[in-house]
Image (cartoon, coloured by chain):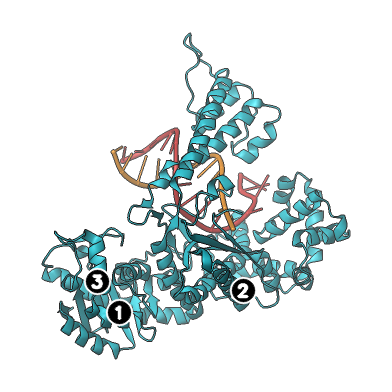
Chain colours: A cyan, B orange, C red
DNA sequence: GTGAAGGGCCAC
DNA sequence: AAACGTGGCCCTTCAC
């Protein structure tokens, strides 16, 4: 395919090009960089195209790149940000009136935000659109070349993607590749959008597109981790792990068959096979798995089992939450810049990695290591029982809704209703029982699992669940409807219209059961994700010109860092954004947000 | 040596 | 036999 493109290296040409592009409502947008990490590499090219006419802007001509005499990358960033010749490009990119179509726009957006110093407005992400369309089913890949093949039936050559973009003179082939990637985007969008409309995914795609900028900024902002505190905590854990390890080793030694004159051979305490073997030799009735909840009942009778559980806890802590996380601190900022995948799960939840900031242990020893730098504060807000409120709203159960409207302790209210007693008489055990019931129901809990979890008999569990569902009849009805309709629809949706295609093997009971549980859970978990994403977009607009920076999100929680003096004001903005987002999707049940200002990410 | 699978466990 | 949803990371084991 021959395409028309123009290579731009000076201010006058850029000004003209931007004037021409500003008249177009929709532009393909792409960048080429020397690295994957914007804190480590150079933003070399920015490409914009209406599909037929493509501009390839080489930022080397505008102060970009590393200089022998300058101060390297930071010098390049400063030069680009302060070069007035780039203002027309910044205006074009930040304009919300001109749609910018990009594939995995978070990447391009982060580079533009950091190196050019402006936001990208009006984003349309073909990657997220493609993920929404496939809706969790099928093996289809979502690379740009895959989409071009799938939606346009053509082949896109990506070999130049990994070429050397730091060369002084880029080759004609490189420039042409860069131009093509941007030029093809309008055409890809046309086809993708047809499918989006066909599957009624316009609203959820808008939600996702509007969430990209906040996430891009959050990744650039990073979360400050106090490395000294973390190391101190790690040293404490390693000391107790080592002690528990020696003790466990000694206790297990009696179970090793071939004890020698030099003492029993050492067992690898992290090997399930070796530990299981040693336990069996000691006469411990080891269950089919050695997971903590399986071993727990044996801990009282067998001290070696208790010691194993103790060791496992310390091992997990020192291995998963040890030295490794410190390696993710970016030297340029001294902060952790994790990778957030916006549609991490088909439900719409985020996934986070490198490192996963959504699985930091809840214990204060760990959370206090994530803190605000001096002079700053953290504003931490989380939705109170958001999934149960969503279930109440979706099922339209009067008693369920009334329980939330009363503002009373929800689990205690459930306990009172299920046990037929007054709220004041609910014991701690009864409340905890009701709590497990409430959470279990969100996951499609069955009577047998509930019996095992609580230690009551199967018959008792069935009777309890019957009483529970009699208390909330319309919730029962909604859950049954989901179970039934998934068998014919093979799909479920959230409040934003997010779709999950649910495949199952009709001849396999467990496969059907899994599909039914998923059909109950997905609309609840997914609507919670919808609400969080909506809140991020609303928050972003509120804090754009303040000292506040988004630094972390954990499913129903948002963490913002700001100047100490602004904390109360930011707390109010955060709460109001989250409440509004909740009210946009949940109308019959009050939304509750708990906000606190703290110097550390702990209570 | 590298990578996938399985077991286990952290978060919501 | 399986047994309540969504993820990521660590370790061991085993195949290539």
Q: Secondary structure at mark 3?
A: helix
Q: Give the mark nearer the N terminus: 1 vs 2.
A: 1
A414 versus A228 height, above or below:
below
| Mark toward the viewer: 3 or 1 | 3
Near-viewer residue (A513 or A533): A533
Determine whether A40 is above or below A146 in the image. above
Q: Nearer the N terminus, badge 3 or badge 2? A: 3
In this rendering, do the residues under marks 3 and 1 share a single chain?
yes
Residue A270 visible from this viewpoint:
yes
Q: Which residue is mark 2?
A: A579
Label whose residue precedes the other's in the sequence (3 or 1): 3
Residue A91 place in picture, x, y as percent: 31, 82
**Secondary structure found at label 2:** helix
Q: Name the residue rendered at 76%, 62% in the picture.
A: A409
How far separated are the C-alphas under marks 3 and 1?
A: 11 Å
Read off the residue under disc 1.
A90
Q: CA distance from mark 3 to mark 2?
A: 39 Å
Q: Position of residue A539 (x, y in %)?
A: 51, 73
- Nearest the viewer among A53 and A257 is A53
Q: From the top left corner, tell me how far across and down residue A209 is, in percent.
A: 43, 75
Q: Residues within 10 Å of mark 3 (few under 14, many from 20)?
A: many
Q: Residue furthest bottom?
A: A23
In the rendered image, the quadrant that contains the C terminus of chain A is bottom right
Q: Are marks 3 and 2 in contact (CB under 8 Å)?
A: no
Residue at 49% of width from left, 78% of height from top? A201
Q: Which residue is mark 3?
A: A80
Mark 1 and mark 2: Cα distance apart in space: 33 Å
Residue at 44% of width from left, 75% of height from top? A545
Q: Is residue A139 left or right of residue A12?
A: right
Task: Say what secondary structure mark 1 lies in.
Answer: helix
């Amino acid at each position: 395919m021959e395409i028309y493109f123009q290579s731009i290296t000076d201010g006058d040409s850029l000004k003209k090009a931007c004037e021409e592009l500003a008249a177009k409502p929709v532009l393909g947008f792409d960048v080429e960089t020397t690295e994957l990490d914007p804190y480590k590499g150079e933003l070399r090219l920015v490409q914009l195209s209406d599909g037929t006419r493509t501009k390839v802007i080489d930022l080397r001509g505008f102060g970009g790149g590393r200089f022998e005499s300058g101060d390297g990358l930071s010098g390049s960033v400063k030069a680009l940000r302060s070069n007035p010749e780039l203002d027309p490009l910044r205006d074009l990119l930040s304009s919300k009136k001109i749609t910018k179509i990009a594939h995995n726009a978070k990447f391009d957006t982060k580079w533009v935000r950091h190196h050019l110093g402006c936001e990208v407005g009006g984003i349309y992400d073909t990657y997220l659109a493609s993920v929404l369309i496939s809706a969790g089913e099928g093996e289809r890949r979502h690379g740009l070349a895959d989409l071009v093949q799938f939606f346009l039936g053509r082949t896109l050559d990506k070999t130049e993607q990994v070429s050397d973009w730091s060369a002084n003179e880029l080759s004609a082939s490189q420039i042409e590749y860069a131009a093509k990637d941007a030029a093809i985007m309008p055409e890809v969008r046309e086809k993708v959008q047809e499918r989006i409309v066909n599957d009624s995914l316009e609203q959820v795609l808008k939600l996702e597109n509007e969430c990209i900028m906040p996430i891009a900024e959050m990744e650039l902002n990073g979360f400050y981790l106090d490395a000294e505190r973390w190391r101190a905590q790690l040293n404490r854990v390693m000391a107790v792990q080592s002690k528990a390890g020696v003790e466990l080793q000694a206790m297990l030694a009696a179970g090793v068959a071939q004890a020698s004159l030099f003492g029993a051979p050492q067992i690898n305490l992290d090997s399930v096979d070796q530990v299981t073997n040693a336990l069996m030799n000691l006469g411990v009735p080891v269950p089919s798995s050695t997971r903590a909840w399986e071993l727990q009942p044996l801990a009282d009778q067998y001290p070696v089992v208790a010691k194993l559980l103790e060791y496992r806890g310390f091992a997990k802590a020192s291995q998963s939450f040890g030295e490794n996380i410190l390696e993710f601190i970016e030297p340029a900022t001294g902060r952790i810049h994790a990778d957030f995948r916006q549609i991490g799960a088909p439900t719409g939840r985020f996934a986070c990695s490198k490192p996963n900031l959504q699985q930091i242990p809840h214990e204060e020893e760990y959370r206090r290591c994530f803190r605000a730098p001096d002079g700053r504060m953290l504003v931490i807000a989380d939705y109170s029982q958001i999934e149960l409120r969503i279930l109440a709203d979706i099922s339209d159960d009067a008693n369920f809704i009334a329980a939330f409207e009363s503002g009373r302790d929800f689990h205690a209210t459930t306990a009172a209703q299920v046990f037929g007693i007054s709220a004041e008489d609910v014991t701690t055990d009864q409340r905890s029982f009701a709590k497990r019931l409430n959470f279990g129901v969100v996951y499609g809990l069955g009577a047998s699992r509930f019996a095992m979890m609580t230690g009551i008999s199967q018959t008792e569990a069935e009777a309890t669940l019957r009483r529970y569902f009699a208390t909330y009849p319309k919730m029962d009805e909604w859950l049954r409807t989901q179970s039934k309709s998934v068998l014919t629809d093979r799909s479920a949706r959230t409040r934003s219209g997010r779709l999950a295609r649910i495949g199952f093997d009709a001849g396999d009971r467990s496969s059907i059961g899994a599909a039914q549980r998923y059909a109950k859970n997905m609309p609840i978990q997914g609507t919670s994700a919808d609400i969080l994403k909506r809140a991020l977009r609303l928050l972003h607009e509120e804090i754009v010109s303040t000292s506040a920076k988004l630094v972390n999100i954990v499913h129903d929680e948002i963490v913002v860092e700001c100047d100490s003096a602004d904390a109360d004001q930011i707390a109010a903005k955060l709460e109001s954004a989250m409440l509004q987002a909740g009210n946009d999707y949940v109308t019959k049940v009050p939304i509750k947000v708990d906000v606190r200002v703290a110097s550390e990410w702990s209570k």
